[in-house]
Amino acid sequence: MYILALDTSGNVCSAAVLADERILCEKYVDNKKTHSVSIAPMADDCLAEAGIGVKDVGLFCCAAGPGSFTGIRIGAAMVKAFAQASGKPAAGVNTLDALAFNASGTDEYVCPVIDASRGEVYTSLYLRGERVSGYRAVDIDTLLAELSGKRTVFLGDAAVSYRGRILAASNGFRIAHPGILLQRAGSVGLIAYAAYKRGEYEDAYTLEPYYLKESRPEQILKEHDGADQSGVNEDGR
């Protein structure tokens, strides 16, 4: 089966074509989130280098989040469009799982960290390829304190942003090698194909982004609505 995988969930824009568990072509560029312009040509280039067309793809997949709200929507919309036009299955892969997959060969704890703004990161924790904690948004210093004493490799865009703070927090912390540090569509495709073989996949109508927390505008609106309701009694007055 041919798989087209996309990751537009962070600063890196990435596309890959796989044949089952073999990556035929993978491209990525750190272009600071101009993904709406970059991702379609990158996907076309990958398909061309693999020697196939969209009609040959049996599974379309994307990094479904958490991450950049706009980036997640771009990737999901493109995969949903391909799946709807072709009638083929679609799959959304958690961005944290895909990042952790990059470093799945280590015996250390693996901690992907994605910038969630305002000093928070999206994160989860993995050991020997298995997730050992839930997905969450947490203050970076709180996370580092919790992991103190654990040999841990960090990866993701927040590992770049908070590099100094991470390395200063513990001698057991390190930053992943640049080749696996950021999102890669190949990892998204490998996880999606493994799930597909287990019968776990979606379609153009059921694939949904995974945001993990509300965007800042949504938080402000909720705070505003809460303030408006503070003076209203049980009868609505």
Image (cartoon, helix red, strand yellow):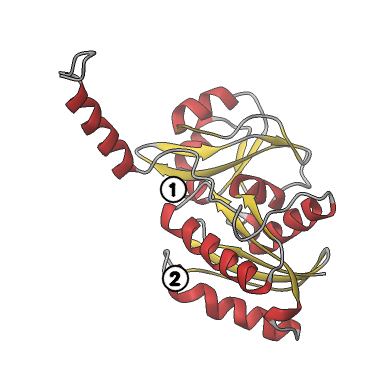
Type of amino acid under label 1: Ser
Q: Which mark is residue 161?
A: 1
Q: Which mark is residue 36?
A: 2
- Sequence-first tag of 1 and 2: 2
Image quarter hosting the N terminus: bottom right
- The answer to whether the residue labelled 1 contacts the one labelled 2, judged by CB atoms less than 8 Å apart, is no
Q: Residue at x 68, y 54 (%)?
A: 202
Q: Is residue 3 above or below residue 171?
A: below
Across the whole image, how many numbered discs are drawn on residues? 2
Image quarter hosting the C terminus: top left
The quadrant in which residue 183 appears is: bottom right
Type of amino acid under label 2: Ser
Q: Position of residue 125 (x, y in %)?
A: 64, 34
Q: Calculate the distance from the C-alpha at mark 1 to the C-alpha at mark 2.
A: 24 Å
Q: 78 or 41, which is in the foreground?
A: 78
Q: Position of residue 21 (x, y in %)?
A: 83, 63
What secondary structure is marked by label 1? helix
Q: Is residue 140 above or below residue 202?
A: above
Q: Is residue 235 above or below residue 57?
A: above
The quadrant in which residue 130 appears is: top right
Q: Residues within 10 Å of mark 1 (few under 14, many from 20)?
A: few
Q: Residues within 10 Å of mark 2 (few under 14, many from 20)?
A: some
